[in-house]
Image: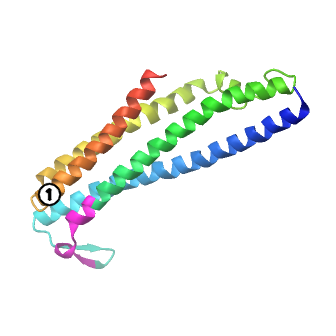
């Protein structure tokens, strides 16, 4: 294989790897945003239950907050909508990263052959087949594809239960929020089943 082709493959490899790293940073930010939005939904539901129990004023760090003037149903529906959008985007980015790694592994092999040294470039392919930290890597995979979806599922189930028991939230908001929650659960299920079947 010519030196020009080897250089071309190497440049493409660097660009692909850089692109993956950028997407991994995006995935990590989205992960934290999703966790924050789940916490926000639960926080809002907790405060709507306080209103239901006739707690109309709350003092936070010396500031008095009149809970009856806050449009909780609108804020809650907005939070549900952001949660659905960001969780869907999170899984889109995760799937994109996985596809890029599937693309990168043969590229490393081809680049190694172009250099005349099989296996010389294997940071992302053969590097992951070593036994070092294999149990930890397996645990991380189980956490993100198994435990994280279960935690989100339990949190959403709990949030829906709280919302349907909150008498101050109008039925239209409950139905809208439930539809968004079902979208979130469907995204979780489709991603989780796909991961476990294609492992």
Magenta stretch contains residue 68: yes
Q: Residue at x 67, y 28 (%)?
A: 105
- Is residue 115 rendered to the left or right of residue 102? right
Q: Residue at x 47, y 51 (%)?
A: 30
Specify the segment rendered in magenta: 64-77
Q: Residue at x 46, y 36 (%)?
A: 144
Coloring scheme of the render? rainbow
Q: Which residue is mark 1?
A: 172
- Is residue 8 rendered to the left or right of residue 164? right
Q: Residue at x 81, y 20 (%)?
A: 118
Q: Is residue 33 visible?
A: yes
The local crowd at label 1, few if under 14, some if 14 to 19, many if 20 or more residues have their Cα within 10 Å, is few
- Is residue 19 rendered to the left or right of residue 5? left
Q: Position of residue 71 (x, y in %)?
A: 21, 70
- Is residue 59 rendered to the left or right of residue 91? left
Q: Position of residue 192 (x, y in %)?
A: 39, 31
SS class of the residue under badge 1? helix
Q: Is residue 120 visible?
A: no
Quadrant in the rendering for residue 153 = top left
The quarter in which the N terminus is drawn is top right
Q: Position of residue 79 (x, y in %)?
A: 31, 59
User: Which of these two is toward me, 37 or 113?
Assistant: 113
Q: Is residue 92 above or below residue 43?
A: above
Magenta stretch contains residue 44: no
Main structural element of the magenta stretch: helix, strand or loop? helix
């Amino acid at each position: 294989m010519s030196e020009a082709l080897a250089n071309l493959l190497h440049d493409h490899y660097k660009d692909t790897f850089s692109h993956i790293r950028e997407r991994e940073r995006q995935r990590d930010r989205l992960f934290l945003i999703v966790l924050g939005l789940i916490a926000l939904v639960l926080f809002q539901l907790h405060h709507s239950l306080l209103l239901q129990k006739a707690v109309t004023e709350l003092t936070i760090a010396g500031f008095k907050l009149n809970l009856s003037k806050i449009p909780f149903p609108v804020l809650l529906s907005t939070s549900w909508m952001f949660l659905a959008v960001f969780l869907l985007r999170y899984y889109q980015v995760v799937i994109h990263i996985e596809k890029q790694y599937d693309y990168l592994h043969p590229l490393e092999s081809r680049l190694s052959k172009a250099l005349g040294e099989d296996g010389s470039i294997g940071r992302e392919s053969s590097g992951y087949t070593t036994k070092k930290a294999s149990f930890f890597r397996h645990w991380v995979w189980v956490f993100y594809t198994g435990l994280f979806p279960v935690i989100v599922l339990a949190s959403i189930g709990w949030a829906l239960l709280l919302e349907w028991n909150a008498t101050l939230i109008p039925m239209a908001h409950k139905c809208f929020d439930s539809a968004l929650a079902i979208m979130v659960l469907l995204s979780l299920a489709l991603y989780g089943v796909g991961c476990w079947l294609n492992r």
